[in-house]
Image (cartoon, grey):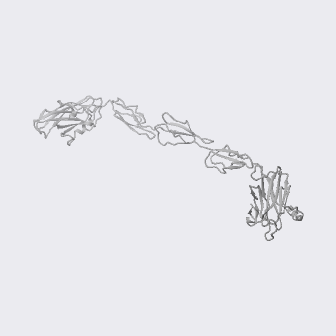
Amino acid sequence: MKKLYLSLGILMLAALCFNSIAWASEASVFDDAEKIITRAYSVCTGGDCTGNTPANPPTYSIYLEVRDTSGNLLTPQDPQGVSVTDITKSPCTTSANCDSGLTCNSGVCTGTPTFNATNKFYTIHNNNASLPDLSITLDPSTGTTYLFCTNGGLMVMEYSIVNNTIVNGACDNRSNGQNFISAPTNLCTSGTPSPSTLSASGPWSWSCNGANGGSNATCSANQTIDGSCVAYSTGLSSPPTNLCTTGTPSPSTLSGPGPWSWSCNGAFGGSTVGCSANQLINGACVTYTTGLPNPPTSLCTTGTPLPSTLSGSGPWNWTCNGSNGGTNASCSAMSSALPDLMITSFQGPGAIKDGQPFNTYITIKNQGVGAAGTFSVKLYWNAGWRTLYGAVNTYTYVTTNFTTWMPIFSYAPNTTTQHDTFITTVTVNSLAAGQSVSLVIPTTISGIATHSSYYEWGVIDEGGAVTETDKTNNVVYQGFSCL
């Protein structure tokens, strides 16, 4: 655009030559630089246009139109159209003091005259000129067009009338095709960005729209993405499938036992991070079904043994500790060098009297390979028979698990009509492997009825003080009758 300004010399010249201006109801001027023809004309738009009614004189509107050298009317919207700007800077106090379409800014009228898109003309005066006479001229040195008209006095308007400049939209290469953490702001080097501002998260796309027939440009930018792992605070029973909160996992899927490792790859200049997850491990014991001659060294199928090594003569106890949230397991192994206590002989009289003392003869052998520490020998009697124990012989071993048998011998009646009655107990301090001990136990049984049958029981180590290879051979019984 050419800089347009009011030429004081032109105004003075116009004032001096006022009487010599060629006045008419229309006038035109050709701008050779812009190759346009500007025509101004007046039209009676109010009052008595015949002039025959002095009380109602005619009033005029003054219009301006612009054509190319082919005679085509040009509009601001045409790609090859024109732009008309009022640069008169007429003084004003409000916009009501300004011509049509202009506004009062900082005490002067500025803006573009109102354009009639239907008839393709600009309104200069809207029914407020008292005379139709006007004249138009061009200062080729500045490109300023002067419009002279009269409204009780000389009025001089200045206009910049130039061809529209074709504007091709162009992306700003500081942003287009680049990577950003946040939305770029430098969008276009020419043209109008659409949208004018971008959203907070990318990727971003926008256009730089051209003007006056110019082309549009399509632009884009990517958001920088840093890789970020999904964090697993505890172990997993299977490979994780949710790997990255941002970024692309590599590998995309995991398999096999843990621990697992992968990376979350950033994009568009973002960083890549390494990730990992542990496998949940439950502790599990190595099971030993028979006694061992030495402390076991293989302790856990999974998990970490605590303690890590065992010593001593056994039995041995350890823990297989899980990890990454897994459970712990308690483990044990028996020594093959354990004792095995067994009653090899159990004898009392076949018949007794109620309350009459007698001796019970009992022989106990340690048939194991390890020494037995202190243990008890207890005697009980009861009436009747439990089918759990099988047939009655002179004396019989009760081949049942010791822990199952123990509740039967109680000091109160059990769930059946029969009950077991404690007689006495003796203590054996120790018994070496392969050795036997014979005991004579003074015994008295009271509360029995004549001509009735009963059973006397011998029980070794009822409290389980000695760890043995076999607890099912610690109980025997023998029948007797009351005289």
Q: Which residue is drawn at 78% across and 69% down?
A: 56
Q: Where is residue 338 in the image (x, y as percent from the top left)?
A: 30, 31
Which residue occupies the foreground of this view, 371 or 459? 459
Above or below: residue 389 compared with residue 412: above
The answer to whether 144 appears left or right of 310 in the picture is: right
The answer to whether 139 appears left or right of 448 in the picture is: right
Q: In which quarter of the image is the C terminus?
A: top left
Q: Position of residue 156 (x, y in %)?
A: 83, 63
Above or below: residue 177 compared with residue 62: above
The answer to whether 236 appears left or right of 40 in the picture is: left
Q: Where is residue 399 in the image (x, y as percent from the top left)?
A: 24, 31
Q: Position of residue 43 (x, y in %)?
A: 80, 61
Task: Determine which quarter of the picture holds residue 441.
Answer: top left
Which residue occupies the foreground of this view, 264 or 121? 121
Q: Tell me if I can see residue 209 in this picture.
A: yes
Which residue occupies the foreground of this view, 389 or 164? 164
Q: How many marks?
A: 0
Q: Tell me if I can see residue 1 in this picture.
A: no
Which residue occupies the foreground of this view, 24 or 4? 24
Above or below: residue 257 compared with residue 213: above
